[in-house]
Amino acid sequence: MLITILDGYTDEPSRLGVPPFIAGYPRYIAGAVFSAGHDVEYMTIDEWRKGRSPSSNLLFIIANANVPGKYLRGTPISERELMNIRKDHEGQVHVWSSLGSKGDPDTLAYDILVNDHNEPRRRTIKEWKEWSEAGARVLEQHPDFPQPAIMEIDMSFGCPRYVSGGCSFCPEIGFGQPVFRPIDDIVSEMQALMEQGAINFRLGGQSCLFTYMTEELGKDAPRPNVKALKELFKKIGQLKGIEVLHTDNANPGIMANHPDETRDILDSLVKVCTGGNLLSMGMESADPAVIRANNLNATPDQVMDAIRMVNEVGSERAENGMPKLLPGLNLVSGLEGETKETYDLNFQFLKKVLDEGLMLRRINIRQVAPTRKDFGPSRLKKDFIRFKSRVREEIDAPMLKRVIPAGTILRNVYMETNRGKRSFGRQIGTYPILVGMEYEVDLEKFHDLIIVSHGQRSITGIEHPFDINKANMQALSSLPGIGKKRAARIIRSRPYGSIEELEKVIEDPLVMESLEAIGLAFSQHTD
C-alpha cells in the first residue's frame, strides 16, 4: 500500500524543518511505514501549493510550526490550507503536531498500519534507531535534495529543566524528562543519510547542547558530560564527506555554572564544525523581575560569561568567510512581569556586548507565542516596537559589520530567489545571514560573493572575482561608487586588460581604491 506523507514543515524551539532543513519527523514516519511493509509518497506543502495532490488514500500531515518566524522560501502550512486539504482528500487523514499530541507521529503511523490503533505513545530507543535509518531513503523525494538540503539530527527530546517547570513559554518542556539518543545511534543515522547522498547536517533536537548525556538529571543546571560530547564529535568527525556541520541551542546558565567543562566542549566543537556555526542562547530577558516570574534560564551576568566564552573559542574566521562559532541571542517580549524598564535593561545589555567588542551572530527578538499558556495581549506593544527598531539600528547594524566586514569573501552562497531585479541567497547552515545582490544571477547554484555593504540584518554582495569585461549594466551599477553613468562608460570602453586601463576610464582614486579591494577579473570577452 502507498502512504502519503505531506510535510507542512516543522519550526520548534529546538527543531527546524522549513526548507532547506528536513526535520526528523517526516523521515521517521517514512521509516515506520517502510518497516511496516508499505511504500511512501513524500511531498511538501510547497508542492501542494503548486498543484500537486496526494496519490494515496491514507495521508499523514505534519503541521508543527509553533515558533513565529519569517521565511525566505518555504512557509509552514496554515490553518486554512490544512482545512482545505482535509476537505478535499477523499481518504483517511491524520494530522500531527507536537502541540496537539502526547505521542510521536512515527508511532502513530506504525500503530495504525500494524497494530490497528492510534493511541498516542512515544517511540522506543530501538524504534528511533530503526526508523531514523530506514527513513533515509525518502530523501530522494524531497525537492531540495541533495542540495541545499540540511538534515536535522535529533540528539534528544525534552528539557533538563523539567524539574523546575522550565521557561514559562517554552513547549519543549512538554516532552518531559529528557531522553538522550545513544552516540552510535546518532552517528548511524547520519551514515544512513550520507549513503543516500546527504552532506549537510545540523545537530538539533536539544534544549541545550551542553546537557547531552548529562549524569545529573534532576538538577536545574546539570553538569555537562564532557566525555560523551567529545566522543560524539570525534565519531562525527570521522565521517567522510560532510560539507556542513552545525549545532543549535545552548543554555547560558549551564555554561556559566560549569565554565571548565564548557570550554573543553567548545574546544572540541570548533575542531569538527564548519564555519558560520551558531549556539542560540535563550536569554529571553535581562530584567531580574521577568527572569524570576518566568523561571528563565540565566541571569544577565551568566549570559555575558557564556557570550565571552564562545567568542574566545570560536571567533576565528573559517574557510567559508564566517567566524567558526558565535553565540546568538533570543529575546522574548510579552512575558509576565514585563515593564517599560524591561526594554531599557535589554538594550543596556546588548549595548554592553557591543561596547566590549564581542560578536553576536544573531539577535532574535519576538513576541511570546501562547504555546504553553496564554500570556494575554501585550500592554507594551509600542514599547516593544520602539525597542526592536532601536536594536536593529543601533546594535544589529554595527554588529553585522563586525561579524562580516566589507571586503569579506563568503564562499558557497546558495542563491534561492529573485525579487524584482535583485537576487537573494544564503550559505547553508544554522540561521544563515541573508545576502542580497543588486542584480540577477543564476538561482539554485552556489556563488562566491564579496561583501560591499550592510543593512540592519542582511548584507549586499557581488560575485567574486568580479569580471569587469563580462558584467552587465545592472551588475556594474551595483559596484561601490559606480552608478549608471560610470557603468555605461565602462561598457563602452571594454575590454580591459588590467586595473590600470580601467583607472583611465574611472578617473577617481577613491573609487579605484574600492574596486581594487573587491578583486576584479579581466577576461578578454565582452557581452
Image (spheres, grey):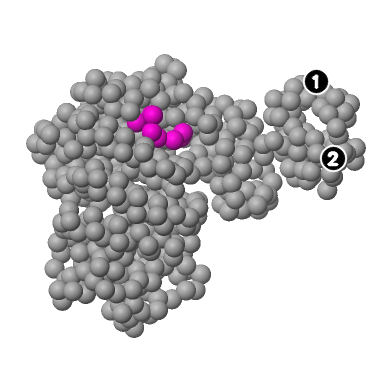
Vertical order, 449 against 145 (above or below): above
Residue 45, picture quadrant: bottom left
Disc 1 is placed on an element classified as helix
In this orientation, does residue 313 appear? yes
Going by the numbered disc 1, the residue's amino acid type is: Pro
Q: Is residue 215 magenta?
A: no
Vertical order, 453 against 260 (above or below): below
Q: Residue 88 at what x, y percent from top left? A: 38, 80
Disc 2 is placed on an element classified as loop
Q: For residue 308, which numbered disc appears in the image?
A: none
Q: Earlier in the sequence, mark 1 or mark 2?
A: 1
Neighbour tally class for label 1: few under 14, some 14-19, many 20 plus, Cα within 10 Å: few
Residue 486 placement, left or right of 164: right
Going by the numbered disc 2, the residue's amino acid type is: Gln
Q: Is residue 272 magenta?
A: yes
Residue, far bottom? 90
Q: Which residues are magenta?
A: 269-276
Residue 29, picture quadrant: bottom left
Q: Residue 230 at what x, y percent from top left? A: 27, 31
Residue 473 placement, left or right of 492: left
Residue 168 placement, left or right of 432: left
Q: Foreground: 334 or 482?
A: 482
Determine the residue positioned at 50% across, 39% down. 433
Determine the residue positioned at 31% across, 55% down. 24
Q: Residue 402 at what x, y percent from top left? A: 51, 24
Residue, far top? 356
Q: For residue 524, which numbered disc appears in the image?
A: 2
